[in-house]
Image: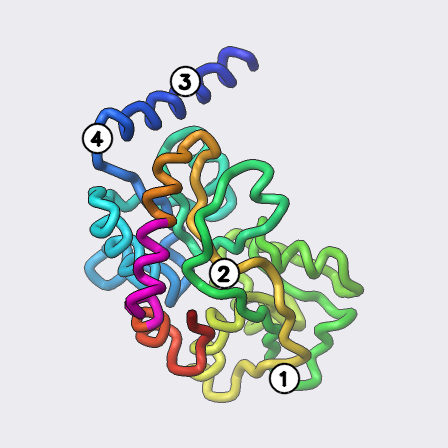
C-alpha cells in the first residue's frame, strides 16, 4: 500500500517538474460521452464544447493539448494516478471533489439539473430515478424520497426511462434538452429544475498549482474578451447562462 502511494506521489511530482522545466504537453482527460459538452464524432475524434474550449485554453496558455478518453466512474482516480493532467468533462465543482483534487475557476456557469420522464405523470418524487454514477445528480437523488438507480454512462440513464426501468432520469438540463427535443414527445421534462454545484471547472491534481494558474489566466481572458460566451451560445443556444 505504501509503495503504491509513494509511486503515485512520485509520478505526480515528476509531472509538475516537467511543466516547470518547460515541457508543454498537457494531457486533457474527458469522457467523450456527454454531448454537447464532449462526445466522439463520426471521425472517431473527441469533439464538443469542451474540446473547443480546451484547445483554446491550451493555445492561450502556450501549452500543447493531447486528448485522452476515460470512463466517468474512474476519471478522478486516473487523474490522481497521473494517467492525464486535467479533467475537462462537464465536472461540477463541489466541496466533496475539492477534497481530492483541485479545480480551476468555472468555465461553465452554475446551471440547473432537471428530471425527464416518458410522460408528465411520471413519479420523480418517490419513484425510481436514474442518474449517472458518481455525479452530483446521483448524490441528490440518494438523499431524496426517490429510489436511485445508477448507471455508468449518461446514455444508459436515458435508456432506463425509455425501456421502463426507471420512472425518470435526473441529469444536467443542458444535456437532456436536445434529447427531449429530438424524442418527438417520447421524453418530457417533469418536476422542478434543481440548481446544483458551483459551475463546471477543470480538475487538476492538487500538486499542479502552476498548471492551475495557467488555465485560470486563460479562462479569465476568454471571459473578458467574450469568446467563452460565443462558444457557450454555439453549443448550448442563446438561452444558456453566460458570463
Query: What residue is shown with label 1?
Result: 119
Q: Quickly name the residue at label 3.
A: 10
Name which of mark 1 and mark 2 comes first in the sequence: 1
Q: Disc 1 versus disc 3: distance between alpha carbons?
A: 53 Å
Circle 4 is placed at which residue position?
Answer: 23
Categorize mark 1 by other alpha carbons within 10 Å: few (<14), some (14-19), many (20+): some
Q: Which residue corresponds to the image point at 49% horizontal and 35% vertical from the top-left?
A: 77
Label pair 1/4, CB-CB below 8 angstroms: no
Kindly report the distance in space between the C-alpha atoms of the residues bearing marks 1 and 4. 53 Å
Q: Earlier in the sequence, mark 1 or mark 4?
A: 4
How far apart are labels 2 and 4 at the CA level? Answer: 35 Å
- What residue is disc 2 on? 154
CB under 8 Å between discs 1 and 3? no
* Circle 3: element type: helix
Q: Are marks 1 and 2 in contact (CB under 8 Å)?
A: no
Q: Residue at x 39, y 30 (%)?
A: 82
Magenta range is 217-229
Amino acid at each position: 500500500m505504501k509503495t503504491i502511494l509513494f509511486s503515485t506521489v512520485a509520478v505526480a511530482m515528476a509531472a509538475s517538474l516537467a511543466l516547470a522545466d518547460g515541457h508543454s504537453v498537457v494531457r486533457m482527460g474527458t469522457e467523450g460521452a456527454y454531448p454537447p459538452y464532449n462526445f466522439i464524432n463520426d471521425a472517431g475524434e473527441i469533439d464538443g464544447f469542451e474540446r473547443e474550449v480546451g484547445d483554446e485554453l491550451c493555445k492561450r496558455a502556450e501549452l500543447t493539448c493531447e486528448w485522452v478518453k476515460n470512463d466517468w466512474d474512474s476519471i478522478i482516480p486516473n487523474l490522481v494516478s497521473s494517467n492525464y493532467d486535467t479533467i475537462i468533462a462537464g465536472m461540477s465543482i463541489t466541496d466533496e471533489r475539492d477534497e481530492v483534487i483541485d479545480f480551476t475557476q468555472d468555465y461553465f456557469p452554475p446551471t440547473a439539473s432537471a428530471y425527464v420522464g416518458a410522460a408528465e405523470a411520471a413519479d420523480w418524487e418517490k419513484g425510481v430515478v436514474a442518474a449517472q454514477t458518481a455525479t452530483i445528480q446521483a448524490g441528490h437523488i440518494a438523499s431524496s424520497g426517490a429510489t436511485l438507480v445508477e448507471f455508468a454512462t449518461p446514455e444508459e440513464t436515458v435508456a432506463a426511462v425509455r425501456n421502463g426501468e426507471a420512472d425518470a432520469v435526473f441529469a444536467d438540463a443542458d444535456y437532456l434538452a436536445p434529447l427531449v427535443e429530438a424524442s418527438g414527445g417520447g421524453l418530457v421534462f417533469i418536476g422542478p429544475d434543481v440548481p446544483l454545484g458551483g459551475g463546471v471547472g477543470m480538475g487538476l491534481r492538487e500538486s499542479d498549482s502552476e498548471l492551475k494558474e495557467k488555465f485560470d489566466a486563460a479562462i479569465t481572458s476568454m471571459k473578458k474578451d467574450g469568446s467563452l460566451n460565443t462558444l457557450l451560445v454555439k453549443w448550448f443556444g442563446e438561452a444558456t447562462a453566460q458570463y
